[in-house]
Amino acid sequence: MRLRSVAAVLGVSIALAGALVRCTLPDLPQPPAAFSTRVKSPRGMLVSLPPGNVDRAALVASLKGIGATTIIIDASADATGEAVADRVALAVELQREVGAADAAILIGTYRARAYEGKPMAALLGPDAAFSVCYPGGVALDPGMAIVDKLRMCSQAVSQKIAEALTAANASQQIGCYITHEPELSDSLTDEGRAKLGDLLRDSARACTTAKRNVAYSTLITARTGDPGVAARILREVLPATGVNHVLVRDGVATTPDASPGRASVYYQSLRTALVDRPPIVNVWADVESFNCETAECERTHPASIDRFRKQLCGAQNRVEVMVTREYLHDFARGSLVDAGADVDAQAILDDTDASAQLRNSYLAWADGGAPCP
C-alpha cells in the first residue's frame, strides 16, 4: 500500500514579508556551553494508520523490535470521519504491550491533507469547498480562513480525545499530537504569526487543561529560508500555546534536491531559540524514511539506507527525541493491515524487499553504535 504524504507545495513569494520579520524579531539567546544531547538513533515512531482494521499484534511486534519509547498515532479524524475511540484504545494498548509503562504516546487530532505543508499565506484565504470537518463533524463558515477552519476542526477532535482519555482513566503519558503540519517559515507576517498561535493554542487546550503532553510537527520546505529567523518566530509563538514538544520534519523526501542533512541547522537554531523561554519546549527530529514516486508524493517507497542514515546523522545529538515515520510496510516487515481491508496488495509486495532491507540495515547500524562521519 502506498500512503499519501505532503501535497505539492505552492509557489508563493513572500520575500518582502520575510525581510520585515527579520527586522522586528529579537536576537537569539546564547546557548549553554554543553548543548548536545545523547540521542543517536530513533526511538520514536510516527505510525500512519489507514482506515479499517489493523493487525495490532504485528504493530506491537514492530514497535518492540525497533525499541520504540515514543509513539505518535498519526490522526484521529480526517475527511473519512472519526476514529477517536479506536485511537484512544490503541494508545492504551500500545503503552501496555510495548513494554514501557512510561512510554510517551501521542494521539493525532485532525488531518486535512490538501492543506499540509502550505505556506501560511495560502492558509489565510478562504476555501468555500472546505465546509465541514468530516461527515457529521463541525460545520464551517464558507468565508472563514482555511487556517481557522483547521483550528476549529483540530480543537473539536482534541476535545474528544481528552474526554476519551479521561473516561478510560488513561495514563498521563498519553497526550495529543496536532496533526496538521504547517510549513516552517522565516517570513510570517504578524497576522500569520497570530493565526499559527491560535491554531496551536486552541488545538492543544483540551489536552493541556487535562495536564497532558502536546506535540506538533512543522515541515521544512524549499521556501523555509533562514533557520535563525524561523526559530525566532517560533520562540515568540510557542510559549502561549501549551505545546511542549515541537517536531521538525526534515522534508528530505518531499522537497526536490534536498540535502539529507539539511535539517541540522534548523534543529540547532530552534533549540537555541527555546532554551531560555519558558515553558520548556523540547525539539524533536521528524525524519522521513520514504521516497516520493510522484511530484505530489501521493505514492511512496522505502528510502535507501544510505540516504536515511545521512538524515539520522544530521539529527544525531542535536535533538531531545528522534522520530521516524513508521508508515507500515517500511519498518514493519510487511503490511500491518488486515487482509479484509481495502489495500493495494501488489504495491505492498513490490516494496517488501526494500522495506526489510531498510529495517535490517537500520537495526544493524543502530546496534553497531549508530556511527556517523
Image (spheres, rainbow, N blue to C red):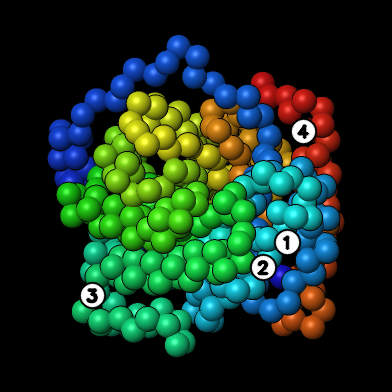
| Mark sitting on residue 144 | 3
Q: Which residue is mark 2?
A: 89
Cα gap from disc 1 to disc 3, whole angstroms = 39 Å
Q: Which residue is mark 1?
A: 93
Q: Earlier in the sequence, mark 4 or mark 2?
A: 2
Residue at 24%, 25% (x, y): give it. Answer: 27
Image quarter where the N terminus lies is bottom right
Looking at the image, residue 331 sits to the left or right of residue 210; the answer is right
Cα gap from disc 3 to disc 2, whole angstroms = 34 Å
Residue at 54%, 28% (x, y): give it. Answer: 318
Marks 3 & 4, CB-CB < 8 Å contact: no
SS at circle 4:
helix
Closer-to-camera residue (64/163):
163
User: What amino acid type is highlighted by mark number 3?
Assistant: Met
Q: Which residue is mark 4?
A: 366
Cα gap from disc 1 to disc 4, whole angstroms = 27 Å
SS at circle 1:
helix
User: What amino acid type is highlighted by mark number 4?
Assistant: Ala
Q: Quadrant of residue 90?
A: bottom right
Mark nearest the camera among 4 and 2 is: 2
Asked whether residue 124 appears in the rendered view, the answer is: yes
Counting from the top left corner in percent of width and height, residue 10 is at 35, 61
User: What amino acid type is highlighted by mark number 1?
Assistant: Glu
Cα gap from disc 1 to disc 2, whole angstroms = 6 Å
Marks 1 & 2, CB-CB < 8 Å contact: yes
Asked whether residue 74 appears in the rendered view, the answer is: no
